[in-house]
Amino acid sequence: MVGAAALLSEAFLRVFGPASNLRIWRAPGRVNLIGEHTDYNLGFVLPMALELACYAATAPRSDDRLRVFSENYGEAREWPVGRLAAARPAGHWSDYLLGVARELVRAGYEVRPANLLVWSTVPPGSGLSSSAALEVSVALALLDGRPIAPLELVQLCRRAENDFVGAPCGIMDQYVAVFGQKGAAIRIDCRSLEHQPIELPAGIAVLAVNTMVKHELGHSSYPERVAQCRQAAARLGVESLRDVTLEMLEKARAELPDVVYRRARHVVTENLRVEQFMKACAEGDLATMGRLLVASHKSLRDDYEVSCDELDFLVETALGIEGVLGGRMTGGGFGGCTVNLLEAGAEDCFHREISEAYRRRFGRDCQIYPCVPAAGAGQL
Ligand code: GLA
């Protein structure tokens, strides 16, 4: 990524002046192939890290300050490093960064005075995990080469988002930003926190399509879903929905409020779909892989109720295009992206047809990103 390095160095020079020992850290966004809203239920997910990434360029300062500049927002913020442990969120983009700094200090890592320039190519609000990419790249930049266990890095960044920013997300995004692998998706067991690489069969292409909308509803609905899943687990007498089988759920159906039952049914069937998808993947059964994506979408739409018109339209439309094996919403929902599985060679036609249909229906352009599994976070 020579291009990104040159761009970051140039921007850093423009904002902070010359730095002799500039270092640049990168953390990727991700697309989740299948296993949605299962991570905080300690289930299975199958994301892959992307080339789209957040970069953090850093050099030491001689005073007592941490000064950050966002190249995306064109805005700076600064804090004395001695006050980071007591930092409070401000409802601002810099909360992600400040949260990471605070968690590092709380975990016993010294945050040293530095200039930091961040620049991200992960579209915000796209469901491609721009926040985790920011958190992980910033954590690495603040550590600037001092060692940290990869899993501790993941958990620390998740705490920044859960406890500081106040978003009760699961572990998938930070995990894949750190452990992502070039050439493979990774299947994460969100309870044991172990993963294995899953190579996709030859002859397929993965494309994400961005609705370019993010409905407000999503903010309150995500914590509500987390709470409903906890309620379902408590009523079923288990620690998490990971421990629930379809049989157990059906038996308890009469005792559960319908909405809680449906939320649980999504989680239980989605965990099964991850396993079925992996099997189909190993067998090169592209048709089944595609069907599982569509089944996942329907479950998210009808049982979990986290889709929206734009996402449903993109999935429906995709299924009518030549060479499309399947598709579904990806990420938290209420806007953001769909992920689509295509036969290789069908990309151009897909691009043309889906763009035209979306513009005709919603009067705005969608954006399309080819997804190739890229490496996890590290120094550029
Ligand atoms: C967001 C969260 C993840 C995960 C997904 C839904 O991306 O950050 O932890 O819960 O939604 O699968």
Image: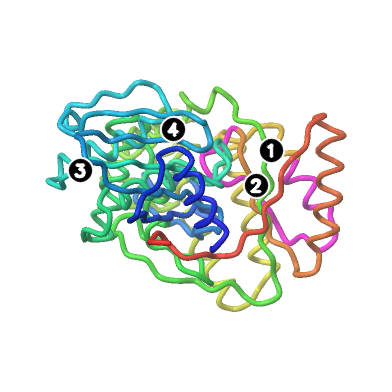
Relative placement, left or right, of 215 versus 187 is right
* Segment colored magenta: 314-334
Relative placement, left or right, of 126 versus 239 is right
- In three-dimensional space, the C-alpha distance between marks 1 and 2, rounded to whole angstroms, equals 8 Å
- Disc 4 or disc 3, which is closer to the eye? 3
- Disc 4 or disc 2, which is closer to the eye? 2
The image's mark for residue 178 is none
Residue 11 is situated, as x and y percent measured from the top left of the image, at: 50, 44
* Residue 319 falls within the magenta-colored stretch: yes
- Number of numbered markers: 4
Q: Are dots 1 and 2 in contact, CB under 8 Å? A: yes
The residue beneath circle 2 is 338
Q: Residues within 10 Å of mark 2 (few under 14, many from 20)?
A: many
The residue beneath circle 1 is 211
Residue 288 lies in quadrant: bottom right
Q: Amino acid at mark 4?
A: Arg
Q: Amino acid at mark 3?
A: Val
Q: Residue furthest left?
A: 108
Relative placement, left or right, of 319 versus 98 is right
Q: Residue at x 56, y 34 (%)?
A: 306
The image's mark for residue 225 is 4
Q: Residues within 10 Å of mark 1 (few under 14, many from 20)?
A: many
